Image (cartoon, rainbow, N blue to C red):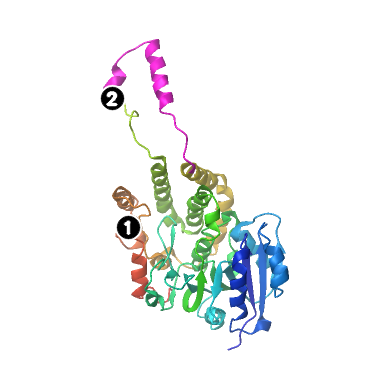
Amino acid sequence: MNWPSVSIVIVNLNGRHHFEQLFESLRGVDYPADLIEIVVVDNASVDGSVQWLDKNAPEARTLQCRQNHGFAGGVNSGVEASSNEVLVFLNTDMRVEPTWLRELVAPIVTREADCTSSLTLSWNGSEVNFGGSAMNFHGIGWQVGMNDPDIDRYRRPCHTLFACGGSMAIRREVYEDAGRFDEDFFAYYEDVDLGFRLWVLGYTILYVPQSVAYHHHMSTSRRIDVHKIRLLQMRNPLWLIYKNYEEGVLQRVLPAALLVHQKRMSYVLHLNDDGYRIDEQDARGKGRMHEVLLKMRANKRSVGIPPPAKADMLAVNDFTTLLDAMAAKRRHIQSRRRRHDSDIVPLFRIPFWAVENSPEFANMIRGLMDAFRLHEIFGTTEVVIDPRVASDRAAEGAFVQAVA
């Protein structure tokens, strides 16, 4: 096999403590060294990362940014600074098997796929971290096999909706043609968005379990305030479904998705209707004193907004504020569509996954499914409470077949 040249792009934010094991594993990969370039994009780290790289990783070229451009912007900066045929994106908190790169690139060389993703295991190799991908109708992605110790269930290659941005490969020309990671996402769901888009544009993504990496899951995110992460994780799914669904599907899915968003926000607000329903007390008493008492009672009920709820509100605000820009991206994607959504949605695996662990929430999903006839789009009426159902379907090989 004629192996292509590869550019490994690594985005770093205060990840110096991971570098020694990361680079030790990269030096041990079974791939022609003269065909590999490594580009590290440093997102304004303050932990001495750049100094460590200069001293200990001469094989890597470091781009030092003055501000944090997020994962999407960091990757795109690294892509611009690189030059090889195949792009490989790798997290800093990874170590890889010697055959990781060769196995990851092989299906791209043979044209079995345009994009590939590794089997990712926990750091100690005891359980799965990423064994394929799934998504529900309103854009919440799931890493198939997450925390499953039965690793052998995920040894079968299959087409998958998206490649995990932590360990993936893609032909450069495909990445450019598809429009790269969307930098407006900053971080989170940029890989889900790209995956959906690739399928819309006629490309294919393959999960390659022969390529194995090990991951310190969430090692960067846990250092960031949870409400800042929630903002991204609530906003970006709305953007990705808005951009990628075809028109007839979007008209039914988007209203339902916004209602799901509102319901999830109500949980973090701990909403109750005490004192907000008109009852017999409202017919009693008149005059100025009564009005004063009403205002006093209303002020007592005023409460601060919890940070997670404010994050949810800001997510919707961002969605509407940037709607013109997203509409332009949507028009561009839809004008180049080569697959109908009906050919893609089988890859979702769990379209009606109820992400909040509540019978009430699951019933709401059923109600939305009926009200907007979503079952006609996704070919199922099954509401899934536990996303590990996606793991069972992966193990059954239900999505190994080619997508038209």
> Label 1 vs label 2: CA separation?
37 Å
Left or right of residue 179: residue 309 = left
The residue wearing badge 1 is: 385
Q: Do the residues under discs 1 and 2 have CB atoms within 8 angstroms?
A: no
Q: Where is residue 230 in the image (x, y as percent from the top left)?
A: 49, 50
Q: Which of the image's four quarters has the N terminus? A: bottom right
Marks 1, 2: nearer the viewer: 1
Q: Which of the image's four quarters has the C terminus? A: bottom left
Q: Main secondary structure of the magenta part?
A: helix
| Range drawn in magenta | 280-307
Q: In this view, does 210 lie above or below 281?
A: below
Q: Where is residue 41 in the image (x, y as percent from the top left)?
A: 66, 64
Question: In the rendered picture of this protein, how many numbered marks are placed on residues?
Answer: 2
Q: Where is residue 371 in the image (x, y as percent from the top left)?
A: 32, 49
Q: Can residue 394 be seen in this view?
A: yes
- Front-most of 371 and 83? 83
The residue wearing badge 2 is: 279
Q: Is residue 168 above or below residue 358?
A: below
Residues packed near mark 1 inside 10 Å, few (<14), some (14 to 19) or many (20 plus): some
Q: Is residue 297 magenta?
A: yes
* Mark 1 / mark 2, whichever is N-terminal: 2
Left or right of residue 370: residue 193 = right
Left or right of residue 143: residue 11 = right
Give the residue type at disc 2.
Asp
Residue shown at 52% from the left, 67% from the top: 198
Q: In this view, does 241 lie above or below 126?
A: above
- Secondary structure category for the residue under label 2: loop
